[in-house]
C-alpha cells in the first residue's frame, strides 16, 4: 500500500486499485482534490471491486479494527462471486497500521455500518445475512464487538443492498443527516425518523422540484476527511441544493463537489469507493 504522503496519526483515505481503471475521471478528480487540500491517500492492491468500504475492516477507535465475513447474498451467483475481495490478508494491514484486528464472526457489509459517536446504526439486513444465528445472538455479537449500542433501521427490501450509508451520515455533535427518503417511500421515512429521533438530532435533506431524481440518494454518500467534505455531483439541479444543505450543516468544513456519475451509475458513491482510517 503506497501512501501519499506518509504523515503521522492522520486520517488517510484508501481506494481500490481498480478505481483508476473503472472510474478514471472520478479517480483523477478525487485524488487531485485530496492533494490540493493535503489529505494523504493510498491504494489497496489486489482488490476485486471498487467498493472497498464494504469489505475493508472497520476502525472503531484509534487502536482497533474489526474485520468480518464479507460474503453478501447479492454476490452469490458465479459471475459475482469472483468479485468478492479476500480480506484474509488482514495481518498485513494490522502490521502496516500497528493496530489490533478483531474478527467478528458475522456476514457484514461495511456499507451497512455507520458509526455515530457512541452508537452504531445498521439496517436489519444483517439479520437476513446471518440466518444461522438468532437475531438476539447477532445483536449481542455486534454489541460486544463494537462495544456500544447498536441501532437497527428496518430494511427496505427495494434497496436490496441494505446499506445504511445510503440512508444517513453522521456529522458529529449527535447530529445525523438523513437522505430524502420521504420523496420515495414516506412509509420508511416515518419509520426511520421515529427510530433516529429517539437518539439523534436528525436533519433531513430536501430538494425542490416536482420530479425527484432517482439518483439523489447519492448525496448522503459523501466522504468527509478531517475538515474536507467531498460531495457527489450528478449533473442535475439538485447538485447545488445538496452542496448548500451539507455546507450549512458543516460550516467549519470545506465542501467540494466531485463529479461522481462513473461510480453512481454502478450503484455507489464516494463513501462506497473509499476507506478512511487513522494511522
Image (cartoon, rainbow, N blue to C red):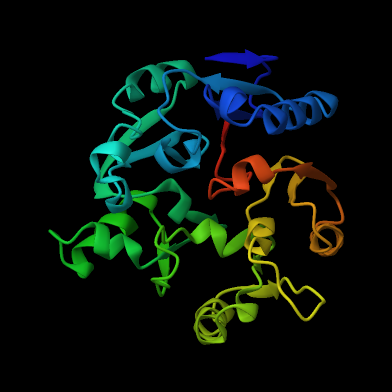
Q: How many labels, in total? A: 0
Image height of 110 relative to 248, above or below: above
x and y, in percent, of residue 262 in the image: 64, 40
Hey, which residue is sitting farthest left in the picture? 132
Q: Is residue 55 visible?
A: yes
In the rendered image, which quarter is residue 88 located in?
top left
Q: Is residue 118 visible?
A: no
x and y, in percent, of residue 133 in the image: 15, 61
Residue at 30% across, 41% down: 68
x and y, in percent, of residue 43 in the image: 56, 20
x and y, in percent, of residue 19 in the image: 57, 28
**Left or right: 260 as drawn, with respect to 91:** right
Residue at 21% across, 57% down: 130
Q: Quadrant of the C terminus?
A: top right
**Left or right: 104 as drawn, with respect to 249:** left
Residue at 25% across, 44% down: 77
In the rendered image, which quarter is residue 204 located in?
bottom right
Image height of 51 relative to 15, above or below: below
Out of 109 and 73, give the one closest to the viewer: 73
**Left or right: 223 as drawn, with respect to 88:** right
Residue at 32% across, 40% down: 80
Out of 84 and 234, give the one closest to the viewer: 234
Image height of 190 relative to 77, above or below: below
In the rendered image, which quarter is residue 144 located in?
bottom left
Amino acid at each position: 500500500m503506497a501512501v501519499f504522503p506518509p504523515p503521522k496519526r492522520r486520517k488517510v483515505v484508501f481506494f481500490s486499485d481498480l478505481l483508476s481503471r473503472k472510474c478514471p475521471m472520478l479517480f483523477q478528480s478525487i485524488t487531485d482534490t485530496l492533494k490540493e487540500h493535503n489529505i494523504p491517500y493510498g491504494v489497496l492492491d489486489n482488490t476485486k471491486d471498487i467498493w472497498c468500504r464494504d469489505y475493508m475492516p472497520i476502525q472503531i477507535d484509534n487502536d482497533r479494527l474489526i474485520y468480518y465475513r464479507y460474503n453478501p447474498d447479492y454476490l452469490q451467483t458465479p459471475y459475482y462471486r469472483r468479485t468478492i475481495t479476500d480480506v484474509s490478508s488482514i495481518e498485513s494491514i494490522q502490521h502496516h497500521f500497528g493496530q489490533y484486528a478483531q474478527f467478528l464472526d458475522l456476514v457484514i457489509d461495511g456499507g451497512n455500518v455507520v458509526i455515530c459517536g457512541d452508537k452504531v446504526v445498521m439496517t436489519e439486513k444483517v439479520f437476513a445475512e446471518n440466518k444461522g444465528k438468532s437475531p438476539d445472538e447477532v445483536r449481542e455479537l455486534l454489541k460486544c464487538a463494537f462495544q456500544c449500542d447498536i441501532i437497527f433501521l428496518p430494511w427496505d427490501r427495494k434497496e436490496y443492498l441494505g446499506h445504511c450509508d445510503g440512508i444517513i451520515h453522521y456529522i458529529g455533535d449527535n447530529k445525523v443527516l438523513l437522505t430524502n427518503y420521504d420523496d420515495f417511500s414516506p412509509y420508511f421515512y416515518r419509520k426511520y425518523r421515529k427510530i433516529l429521533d429517539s437518539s439523534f438530532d436528525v436533519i433531513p435533506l430536501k430538494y425542490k422540484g416536482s420530479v425527484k431524481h432517482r439518483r439523489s440518494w447519492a448525496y448522503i454518500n459523501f466522504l468527509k476527511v478531517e475538515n474536507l467534505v467531498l460531495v457527489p455531483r450528478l449533473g442535475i439541479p439538485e447538485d447545488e441544493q445538496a452542496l448548500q444543505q451539507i455546507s450549512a450543516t458543516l460550516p467549519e468544513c470545506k465542501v467540494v463537489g466531485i463529479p461522481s456519475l462513473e461510480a453512481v451509475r454502478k450503484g455507489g458513491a464516494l463513501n462506497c469507493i473509499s476507506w478512511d482510517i487513522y494511522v
